[in-house]
Amino acid sequence: MSNHPSQPPPHPRPHRARLLRAGAAATAGLAAATAALGAGELLAALTGPDTAPVIAVGSTAIDLTPTPLKEYAVRTFGTDDKPVLLGGILLTTALLAALAGLLATRRPAYGAGVFGVFALAGAWAALSRPDAHPAAAAPALAAGLVGAAAVLALARLLRTTGPTSVTVAAAAVPAGRAGSSRRTVLAATGGTIVAGALAGVGGRTLSDRRTDVAAARDAVRIPPAANPLPPPPAALRPKVAGLSPFVTPNADFYRVDTALTLPRIDPRQWALRIHGMVDHPLLLTFDDLLHEPLEELDHTLSCVSNEVGGPYVGTTRWLGASLPVLLRRAGVRPGADQLVGRSQDGMTIGTPLESVLDGRRALLAVAMNGEALPVAHGFPCRSIVPGFYGYASATKWLVDLDVTTFAAFDPYWVRRGWDRTGAVRTAARIEVPAPFARVPAGEVTVAGTAWATHRGVAAVEVRVDGGPWRQALLAADGGPDLWRQWSHTWAGATPGTHRIEARATDATGAVQTEERAAPFPAGATGWHSTVVTVT
Ligand SMILES: Nc1nc2c(c(=O)[nH]1)N[C@H]1C(S)=C(S)[C@@H](COP(=O)(O)O)O[C@H]1N2
Ligand SMILES: [Mo]
């Protein structure tokens, strides 16, 4: 800034002054961004929570993320991948905002331009969501305008009264004036941050209240099953401390989806369309669905992204209308081979039609373990087709079923390179002892869970340190659609470090392969192992 017209006279601490100036400018940018995001949230209370700029950008980022990076994120952050993504977006926003503030004190138009780019990116992201309406762009555009106006105003204030002139003034004018201009800058910056934060929190609260479906969900009365199943027998689970429960409580059921804000659907406004290659397209309301004879299905759902030994698997008693009955009522035309479910948030999930109609108990589920589906698990309705990973069978927030062909349509995950079929691979998981546990020498109880959904588990074997395979003791068999728990007594465990391995055989007689494969593109393979220390 040596050519600056108001070049200050030599100052005893120029570095400190420059730093202060830069800090104040960056903070002004951050304040403007806070105001911008606050304005976006406030407007999103009207246009829908998923149109708020950060959410819209985040959702688009999820859809655009290349598969390997997404795999890495799920592997590294697990179900925290969404907070990590939002944190990353906020951090990037903060860095760019600080840069905008620095630019604005020199070239106001550039500073404002950064917010213009923000606005356009946010608007584009919001408009490119599958369920977008034109008003979806409004929050991002408003955010851009507010941010640009705020950064211009704050930068102007800084140029006239900011730390540059404050420090200069401190040398030249009575201390009172320098203090008051510093207070002006602080007050304006702080005020902008507070106003932005209030607008943000207020907007989010308002939109949560507007879209809340908790009351509507509580009001739902799910009729009992036409032929209720007996409670799951205790013999399904070996009595081993530390082994997971046979039926997974809803609160502990894994959640995997691309939704940054959960779709909140009022069941009174919900309808399901069954159409495509059918003779009689159907439109079913939630009431219609509840008037169908409801079936119970005890079933183990798992995610294709689950690593060997991983947690993305759970067992539930689902309740719902029969999917094959409704498809037959619609009259499936010859030639159709794929059933595509579409969710309210635009997810598409394809299942082989032949499997849905081959006699297995596929459901349009409305309840999970005796209560209406939790919002995170698809309220008010999701599909369940035993034998397939969730990405190929279990559309949450389901609103549309399209009877089509594999040739005509690639669903969301298939477009990203995942296997078309999505059949569940055989898996065995060691749960007891826990990894790196210290156990006393002698007899060690080993126990776990195995699944080969819709084929069923016929055997589980255990070995220690690469020794001979021993048959584990299988608990009672709940049927092929359920996981099977097992236990084994490892006799003669000697002090030291040991490696326990397990493998399952499915009911077709196929032994689980040792070959390690990553979850992409068709599900992980390989034997689970756990290392323990015997003392
Ligand atoms: N609408 C919607 N449905 C979805 C998904 C999704 O991202 N969106 N993810 C699928 C995947 S990959 C899995 S494994 C299951 C997980 O269901 P859960 O979250 O109830 O365990 O939902 C499936 N259904
Ligand atoms: Mo999944």
Image: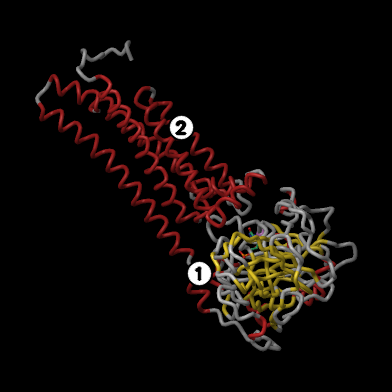
Give percent across and percent down for residue 420. 79, 55
Give percent across and percent down for residue 295. 70, 82
Q: In this view, does 189 lie above or below 415?
A: above
Q: Nearer the viewer, residue 471 or 309?
A: 471
At 75% from the left and 73% from the top, the residue drawn is 471
At 74% from the left and 53% from the top, the residue drawn is 516
At 22% from the left and 20% from the top, the residue drawn is 13
Q: In this view, does 295 lie above or below 461?
A: below
Residue 432 in which image quadrant: bottom right
Q: Is mark 1 on a helix, strand or loop?
A: loop
Q: In this view, does 29 lie above or below 66?
A: above
**Dot 2: within a 10 Å radius of its alpha carbon, few (fewer than 14), some, or many (20 or more) residues?**
many
What's under tag 2, amino acid-wise? Val
Quarter of the image that includes the N terminus = top left
Q: Mark 2 points at which residue?
A: 114
Q: Is residue 19 found left or right of 432 in the rendered image?
A: left
Give percent across and percent down for residue 353. 82, 65
**Dot 1: within a 10 Å radius of its alpha carbon, few (fewer than 14), some, or many (20 or more) residues?**
some
Question: What's the distance in space between the residues labelled 1 and 2, CA to CA?
Answer: 38 Å
Q: Is residue 58 found left or right of 64 in the rendered image?
A: left
Residue 33 in which image quadrant: top left
Quarter of the image that includes the C terminus = bottom right
The residue at label 1 has a CB less than 8 Å from ligand 1: no
Name the residue at the right extreme: 334
The residue at label 2 has a CB less than 8 Å from ligand 1: no
Q: Residue 21 carries which label?
A: none
Q: Is residue 453 above or below residue 29?
A: below
Of the numbered discs 1 and 2, the one sitting upstream in the chain is 2
Q: Name the residue under label 1.
A: 213
What's under tag 1, amino acid-wise? Val
